[in-house]
Amino acid sequence: MEIVQIEMREIRLRLVHFFETSFGRTTERRILLVRVLDHEGAEGWGECTAGEGPFYSEEWIDGAWEVTRRFLAPMSLGREVESAAGVGELFRRVRGNRMAKAAIETACWDLEASRLGVPLWKHLGGVRPEIACGVSIGIQDTLEELLDKIERELADGYQRIKIKVKPGWDREVVEKVRARFPDINLMVDANSAYTLDDAPMLRALDEYGLMMIEQPLAYDDREDHARLQRQLKTPICLDESVRSAEDARKAVELGACRIVNVKLGRVGGHAEARRVERVCRESGIPVWCGGMLESGIGRAQNIAMATLEGFTLPGDISASARYWEEDIIEPPVLVTPRGTIHAPDGPGLGFKIKRERIEALTVRAETMAAA
Ligand code: OSB
Ligand code: MG
């Protein structure tokens, strides 16, 4: 495969409801979309999952934009690679910046699957035509709002509820949620809001039968997570701290987690995500697909990834309508009454890209072509 054109655009998309984590509140997404073209005009779409600021990780949209136009696009345009699986290699000289890399890499996978006329999920080696879905519920202004939200999500069929926690919105909240919903699959995500000094509070959470505690400690830590895991009954799930298959291997060897959240952007694309899935599967560590408030394009990429064998737990992949008034793909992502999403049958991502809507939402665009 050879990419001859890369189109970058930034779109703005307003969330139906704000999303708050321990690192801040988001009301409107700024999303970098990437479209790649080969010499025959076949196209592929990818989404950069970098946030509006460098708060989840170091990456953020303006940094990703610049790194894409100045380094990643020139490094990949006009370069012949055997397949999409080799695109990541072209970027080897660039350290980090995995979300920016993943936008191009995942677009190339979509292009390749489209050219072959197969659904991306099958092309990746997916084994599961229907994936299990959970929801991630941000920090709310009041406990009542949180409880109401959980009730609505359960009524919609979602199989697992994740609530965001931070100091001051943790133990009591979990206690009340558990009291109201004694039997649900419940978990919490701290986005690195705690330190080992908080071990007593985190240990107290053992009482509530949580499926897991996601990323309680520092975003780049594995050692302290291993210490903490030894003190907890509840499994720790790593998100931020696993950026590669090597990170996953070390985390598992250290005993830093018993579950791993895989995000395409965080690990740099499908090729690395498959390697993370494999390392975990071979060590008996279940994985699930995380979310980054993606538009339909990133969501479709996530659906494809979540069909891989090791993705045995419900992911943060939910219906378009939970995020957007109107998505940029058609049909929107829909969730069945039993809390699942069907992987599409069509080639590539398997959704129609709403070009006109994307055009209308675009605030800047840049096209780069092979020399
Ligand atoms: O830690 O999983 C996270 C959103 C933005 C940044 C980090 C995270 C999240 C989510 C949202 O939890 C998941 C979703 O897309 O619904
Ligand atoms: Mg997380």
Image: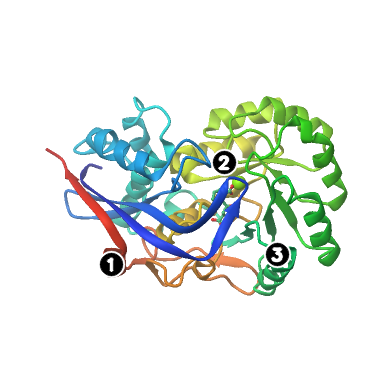
**Mark pair 3, 2: CA separation:** 32 Å
Could you tell me which quadrant the N terminus lies in? top left
Amino acid bearing label 2: Glu
Q: Position of residue 15 (x, y in %)?
A: 48, 64
Query: Left or right: where does residue 9 sit relative to residue 279?
Result: left
Q: Position of residue 270 (x, y in %)?
A: 44, 43
Residue 218 circle label: none
Label 1: few (<14), some (14–19) or many (≥20) C-alpha neighbours in 10 Å: few
Which colour scheme appears in the figure? rainbow
| Residue that carries the numbered disc 2 in the rendered image | 277
Which residue does the image show at 45% across and 44% down from the upper left?
A: 53
Which residue does the image show at 35% across and 43% down from the upper left?
A: 62
Could you tell me which quadrant the C terminus lies in? top left
Which residue does the image show at 24% across and 53% down from the upper left?
A: 365
Is tag 1's residue or tag 2's residue first in the polypeptide sequence? 2
Is residue 250 visible in this depiction of the protein?
yes
* Mark 2, secondary structure of its residue: helix
* Mark 3, secondary structure of its residue: helix
| Residue that carries the numbered disc 1 in the rendered image | 360
Q: Position of residue 149 (x, y in %)?
A: 67, 68
Q: Are marks 3 and 2 in contact (CB under 8 Å)?
A: no
Q: Position of residue 201 (x, y in %)?
A: 82, 41
Quarter occupied by residue 94: top left
Label 3: few (<14), some (14–19) or many (≥20) C-alpha neighbours in 10 Å: some
Residue 146 circle label: 3
**Mark pair 1, 2: CA separation:** 37 Å
Amino acid bearing label 1: Ala
Label 2: few (<14), some (14–19) or many (≥20) C-alpha neighbours in 10 Å: many
